[in-house]
Amino acid sequence: MAAATVDTTSSKIKNGWQMALSALQRMFYDQVPVGCRIPVTDGTATVATTNIDDVGDILRISPKLPPGTHIWDFRGTPSLLDSHGTPFLVYDVVFVTEADVVVATLVSGSTAASGTISVDRIANAAVGKYCGEGYLALKITTAARTAAAGTYKLAYDFSIGTVRPGQIKAQMSDAEA
């Protein structure tokens, strides 16, 4: 069979300005930055020993993000929060609702705060994930034997909604559902 070029629903839209105009109208008329990535360098969250000494502890590390939130990037750098006693501190970086229901896991099974300090990065599967309204948080999966107080520096990108080029409209809910 010879090579062929095939258009998808999105690529059949030959006027990309129409898609951009839809998003810009929603942003300016409704005063909601639909689809625009908002970079946040949120500074540093303080971590007390009581925040990481029990399995299931949740430490919210971001402001409450608005309805329609999609997470695009995440980077976190903890200080040494575990004084090297086994079991080592293990945590997930998650997105939780006000009721602490985990909506998405951005980083799974991190030991970045134990021993050699490293950086937590968002998992490929979590990039662009619809999360709704809630917080970025650390959820302890293995408590530190000897927890140490410290800090957690973070930076992340999020958007409120996305733009759906196949439909020429802004999408405020989960586009994948």
Image: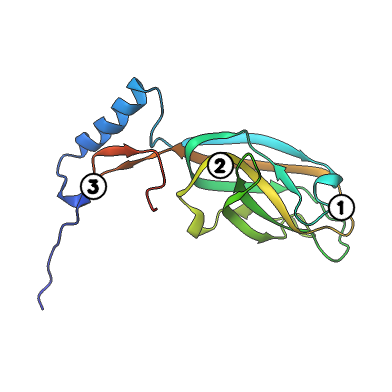
| Tag 2 and tag 3, C-beta contact below 8 Å | no
In-image side of 63 versus 142 (left or right): left
Badge 2 marks a residue whose secondary structure is strand
Inter-mark Cα distance, 2 to 3: 27 Å
Q: Mark 1 belongs to which amino acid? A: Ala
Q: Assess disc 2: are there few (<14), some (14-19) or many (≥20) residues with their C-alpha within 10 Å of its C-alpha.
A: many
**Marker disc for residue 156:** 2
User: Residue shown at 72%/38% (left/top)?
Assistant: 45
169 in relation to 77, above or below:
above
User: Residue shown at 13%/63% (left/top)?
Assistant: 5
Front disc: 3 or 1: 3
| Foreground pick, 66 / 77 | 66
Badge 1 marks a residue whose secondary structure is loop
| Foreground pick, 74 / 174 | 174
Inter-mark Cα distance, 3 to 1: 50 Å
View extreme (bottom): residue: 1
Judging by the rendered image, the residue that carries numbered circle 1 is 147
Q: Assess disc 3: are there few (<14), some (14-19) or many (≥20) residues with their C-alpha within 10 Å of its C-alpha.
A: few
| Tag 1 and tag 2, C-beta contact below 8 Å | no
Number of marks in the rendered image: 3
| Foreground pick, 57 / 125 | 57
N-term-proximal mark, 2 vs 3: 2
Q: Mark 3 belongs to which amino acid? A: Gly
Q: Assess disc 1: are there few (<14), some (14-19) or many (≥20) residues with their C-alpha within 10 Å of its C-alpha.
A: many
Judging by the rendered image, the residue that carries numbered circle 3 is 166
Front disc: 2 or 3: 3
Residue 82, horizontal then vertical, whole percent? 83, 55
71 in relation to 91, above or below:
above
**Marker disc for residue 52:** none
